[in-house]
Amino acid sequence: MDESGAVGCAWQQGAGISGRTQFHALGFRVLEKEPLMRASPQRRSDLPGHCRAAGWMLALAASLAGCADTMPPLPTGHTLVGSVADLRVDRSQLPFPELAEHPFAADGALDLDDIATLAVLNNPDLKVARADAGVTHAQAFAAGLLPDPQLQLTRDFPDRQEAGTTNAFNLNLSEDLNALLRHPHDKRAAELDARKTDLNLLWQEWQVVAKARTLGVKLVQEQRLQRVLQENRRLFADRYQRTEQALERRLLAIDAVTPHLTALQDVDKQLRDLERQVNTDAHDLNALLGLLPDTPVPLRAQLAVPDIDESAVLALLPDLPARRPDLIALQAGYQAEDQRVRAALASRFPTFNVGFTRARDTSGVYTHGFGVTLSLPLFNGNRGNIAIEEATREKLRRDYESRLDTMQSDVHRILSEQRINARQLREVKEGIASLSTAAADADAAFRARAIDALAYVTLRASLLSKQVEEINLEQSILEQRVALQALIGPTTAIPALK
């Protein structure tokens, strides 16, 4: 404990403090011991009891500043995790029941739900958002406290001490009645703001889950595409090596070698581009999960693409205003602003400040009474603040309507894109089946020199193109499923992606 803390706590323990104080960077500290007033004992005894009590109250306020809570130290390095195995999954902290019930990394590899779980628990941005929510709740607590009364104490000393004169004082205790009138509305608005913050935090968690799943889908599909390209590269490299050796022995012409070289270089370019993309997505996923950049994340090798029930998804749309956190948060924000409008309307009335006084003049006459401070709403009447709050409330209503309309459009758009992609995926799979059969026949024909190299390479390139198209279409469908889950929330209408 520092010097200021020792001073404050000594007061609380009954030691007492008297002395001149000075503001210090960490609070108050005593400079020297001296009386609070340099008056004679007889003169000090002239002070009424309540004046002496007020002095002790000021000393108490000064001393308590030294008992402030100790500030925790800042970290000296990064707080990122170096291994997925070092992460601890506390299911009680998961806001999504389907994630809490999901067996984490059951087979040693991470599926999309496992990635979502790690993102919710360890994402750095969510940790900051939760701290922000704590600030909002503290503000709601502060708004719920009643306003403190005001105590004013003055003391006058005659220029010359004469017979029958004494020191004068004036003690005034007052309370702002308008603050009491506004208090229920301010308190309710702060409570609704805290609820809005919690809901926005839940919505942010939804978005982080969706982003984590999307990055998981991209990495799984990109790694799958890498395997397909590497397999075709080995084929083209083998064909190029064989034809080049035949060319050196003058068994083939140059036109039989060039198509294999071109196909090999094209696959190499795709692999280089894909390698850069995988590196980017892997770093993005690690940053999202709060992991060190080079930490490997073991993902499953392949994802299934289950069917969805479109009619069940559309049936959920009318209930989304009561299910989606962002929409409920907008509702809470709208209600909070309505409370601020009511508080502004309550401030139209004249401002009352009521106080009670106790005084003594220099002739030693004691008086008591009361005072009322009243503002006349002749020019302002708080009309400006009322107009601002009403306009803000209308803006929030329009924001809510816009979010509802956007939600409807996004769901219908994704469902339409799903139908298109599903149809194209079926067509591509049929094309792959036909080209695979043709490629097998072409391979045998090429070995028998029944077809030329250009025709063979063209057929193999067409098959590779269809395989790439299949992987890309499946990735689009999976990403759209993730986006649909983020729009309407967990539901059996959208099967989990495994």
Image (cartoon, rainbow, N blue to C red):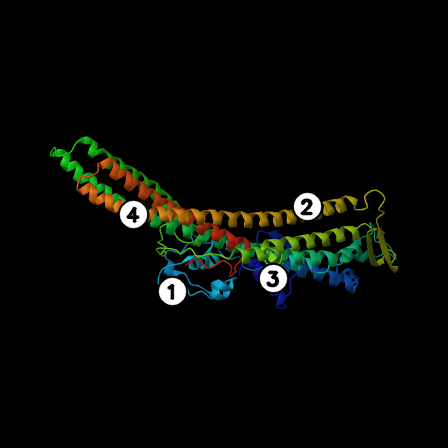
Q: Earlier in the sequence, mark 3 or mark 2?
A: 3
Rendered location of residue 143, percent (x, y):
68, 57
**Left or right: where does residue 273 sit relative to residue 92?**
left
| Residue 50 visible in the displayed image | yes
* Left or right: 398, with 365 as reference point: left
CA distance separating discs 3 and 1 = 56 Å
Mark 1 belongs to which amino acid?
Answer: Ala
The residue that mark 4 highlights is 436
Q: Amino acid at mark 4?
A: Ser
Are discs 3 and 1 less than 8 Å apart at CB?
no
Say what secondary structure mark 1 lies in. loop
Decide: marks 3, 2 in contact (CB < 8 A)? no
Q: How far separated are the C-alphas under marks 3 and 2?
A: 49 Å
Other-residue count near label 4 (Cα within 10 Å), few / some / many at <14 / 14–19 / ≥20: some
Task: Tell me the residue at 59%/50% (across/down).
Answer: 408
- Location of mark 2 (residue): 395
Query: Where 490 falls versus 409 (above or below)?
Result: below
Nearest to the eye among marks 3 and 2: give it: 2
2 and 1 marks in contact (CB < 8 Å): no
Q: Amino acid at mark 2?
A: Lys
- Label 3 SS: helix
User: Which type of secondary structure does the marked residue at label 4 adopt?
Assistant: helix
Q: Nearer the viewer, residue 68 or 281?
A: 281
Query: What quarter of the picture does the C terminus occupy?
Result: bottom left
Query: If you read the primary sequence from the N terminus, does the residue marked by circle 3 or circle 4 appear first?
Result: 3
Query: Dividing the picture into quarters, in which one does residue 197 lie?
Result: bottom right
Q: CA distance from mark 4 to mark 1?
A: 35 Å
Q: Which residue is mark 1?
A: 106
Q: Which residue is mark 3?
A: 8
